[in-house]
């Protein structure tokens, strides 16, 4: 199989990524060619590959967990949740085909779709109390792991070894099954901790897979490296921002439904906000991190206000929540404009934050109205849209502190752990260096933070 065209971004997110330059545009006053300088370390061809993979793979984990929950609940929107998961699979198929050709994409898709089906079998058997069916589904998933691992080993010409990918797939399947079993048993704290763990794990696999592909086809990616401090920064922000959109949408659904899992869903969303505030604080200092946390947290509260007002059929309360969100948009944009010294302009941020708010409100209003097709289309749009602030903010930060984000050499060999582990030969994917400070590795602390919340 040969690479027949270059993947720069996934079909769903390409159109949303195009305006990124506006968010990272020069603010003038001594920067001159700064737009080009800002884009260079975070928007190389290798970086775009990694971010595209990060977005589609983390969304897979998010949608898989949510669809399984809808399935066991017998929810009216199960078909649409499943449809969103399958649409995500189409995006991933297109991504693989863009690298390894149509034949490779079809081969990958057949294997990938099978494991989605086996998860559905597991959910169905659980709902029926069919232990034999559950064991059969788990056995089928074991066979899937072997077949999928062989595909990646062959496609990457051994850069992702079968043993390493199998190990990573073991973790992926275990995380999703743990999240589902815990949810079915009413252990919502474990369910949401495992959901976040699965999202973060797939972000790590995106890094590893992008390293393999760019090493395999260096000329197609201008010999750029997806595993640098600058790209790590963008990928880390990409994961946090997209996860925020997904968790917010589902927490709002739980809220209006009066679901038993609402407290834990909200706690997962707040734990995500903690991670983002810590990232901002590590860059701009503790005081700025606290200020960001207060503003960012306020918009989560306004969404809750909107959900509450909707549940109470309180039109005045809905309008007040929208007005509060409008004020939040202005305040958040002003803070980031000031922090980045104009590299992320307030007007562009206001436009982007308005889109974010509108997408989540559209998803929620459509869900309440029973228009589940629109609801899940808007959720996916909100998820993809959050790649934009991640791109813009990371570009601004690397321009503001260029000495911290020099281009690293292409790794001489692949990480030994395949799907998202760490090794002595790979950079920890969430280790962000800025102004001499280390941002804590999110993947190792998420479970603890979520449980504390």
Image: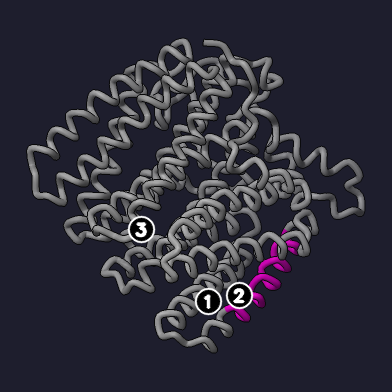
Which of the two labelled residues, at mark 1 and mark 2, occupies the earlier sequence position?
1
Q: Residue at x 45, y 76 (%)?
A: 307
- Tell which of 49 and 5 is nearer to you: 5
Q: Residue at x 58, y 36 (%)?
A: 10
- Tell which of 403 and 363 is nearer to you: 363
The spot of residue 86 in percent (x, y) is 41, 40
The residue stretch that appears in magenta: 322-339
Q: Secondary structure at mark 2?
A: helix
Instruction: Please give the residue where the numbered disc 2 appears in the rendered image.
Output: 325
Q: Does the CB distance between marks 2 and 3 fall below 8 Å? A: no
Residue 302's mark? 1
How many badges with numbers are in the image?
3
- Tell which of 85 and 305 is nearer to you: 85
Indicate how the structure is coloured in the image. one colour
Instruction: Please give the residue where the numbered disc 3 appears in the rendered image.
Output: 77
Which of the two labelled residues, at mark 1 and mark 3, occupies the earlier sequence position?
3
Q: Secondary structure at mark 1?
A: helix
Which of the two labelled residues, at mark 2 and mark 3, occupies the earlier sequence position?
3
The spot of residue 62 in percent (x, y) is 40, 48
The spot of residue 433 in percent (x, y) is 60, 43
Q: Does the CB distance between marks 1 and 2 fall below 8 Å? A: yes
Q: Secondary structure at mark 3?
A: loop
Q: Residue at x 46, y 83 (%)?
A: 309
Q: Is residue 264 above or below residue 132?
A: below
Q: Where on the picture, by quarter, is residue 69?
A: bottom left
Residue 436's mark? none
């Amino acid at each position: 199989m040969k690479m027949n065209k270059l993947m720069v971004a996934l079909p769903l997110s390409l159109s949303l990524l195009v305006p990124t330059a506006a968010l990272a545009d020069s603010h003038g006053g001594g920067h001159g060619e700064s737009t080009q300088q800002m884009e260079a370390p975070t928007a190389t061809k290798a970086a775009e590959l990694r971010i595209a993979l990060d977005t589609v793979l983390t969304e897979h984990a998010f949608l898989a967990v949510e669809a399984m929950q809808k399935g066991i609940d017998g929810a009216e929107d199960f078909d649409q949740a499943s449809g969103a998961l399958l649409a995500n699979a189409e995006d991933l198929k297109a991504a693989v085909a863009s690298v390894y050709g149509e034949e490779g994409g079809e081969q990958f898709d057949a294997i990938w779709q099978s494991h989605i089906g086996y998860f559905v079998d597991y959910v169905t058997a659980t709902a029926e109390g069919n232990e034999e069916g559950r064991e059969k589904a788990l056995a089928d998933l074991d066979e899937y792991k072997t077949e999928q691992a062989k595909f990646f080993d062959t496609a990457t010409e051994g850069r992702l070894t079968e043993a390493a990918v199998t190990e990573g797939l073991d973790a992926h399947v275990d995380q999703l099954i743990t999240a589902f079993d815990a949810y079915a048993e009413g252990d919502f704290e474990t369910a949401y901790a495992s959901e976040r763990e699965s999202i973060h794990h797939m972000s790590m696999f995106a890094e590893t897979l992008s390293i393999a592909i760019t090493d395999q086809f260096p000329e197609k990616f201008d010999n750029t490296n997806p595993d640098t401090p600058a790209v790590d920064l963008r990928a880390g922000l990409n994961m946090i921002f997209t996860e925020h959109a997904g968790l917010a949408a589902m927490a709002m659904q739980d809220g209006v439904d009066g679901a038993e899992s609402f407290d834990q869903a909200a706690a997962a969303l707040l734990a995500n906000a903690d991670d983002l505030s810590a990232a901002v604080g590590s860059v701009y200092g503790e005081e700025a991190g606290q200020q960001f946390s207060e503003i960012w947290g306020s918009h989560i509260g306004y969404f809750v206000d909107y959900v509450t007002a909707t549940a109470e059929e309180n039109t005045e309360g809905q309008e007040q929540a929208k007005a509060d969100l409008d004020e939040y948009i202005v305040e958040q944009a002003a803070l980031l404009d000031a922090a980045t010294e104009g590299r992320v302009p307030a007007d562009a941020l206001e436009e982007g934050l308005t889109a974010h708010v509108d997408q989540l409100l559209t998803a929620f209003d459509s869900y309440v109205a029973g228009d589940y097709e629109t609801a899940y289309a808007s959720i996916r749009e909100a998820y993809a849209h959050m790649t934009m602030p991640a791109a813009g903010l990371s570009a601004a930060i690397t321009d503001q502190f260029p000495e911290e984000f020099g281009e690293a050499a292409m790794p001489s060999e692949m990480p030994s752990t395949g799907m998202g582990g760490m090794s002595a030969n790979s950079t920890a994917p969430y280790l962000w260096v800025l102004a001499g400070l280390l941002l804590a590795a999110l993947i190792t602390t998420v479970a603890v933070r979520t449980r504390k919340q």
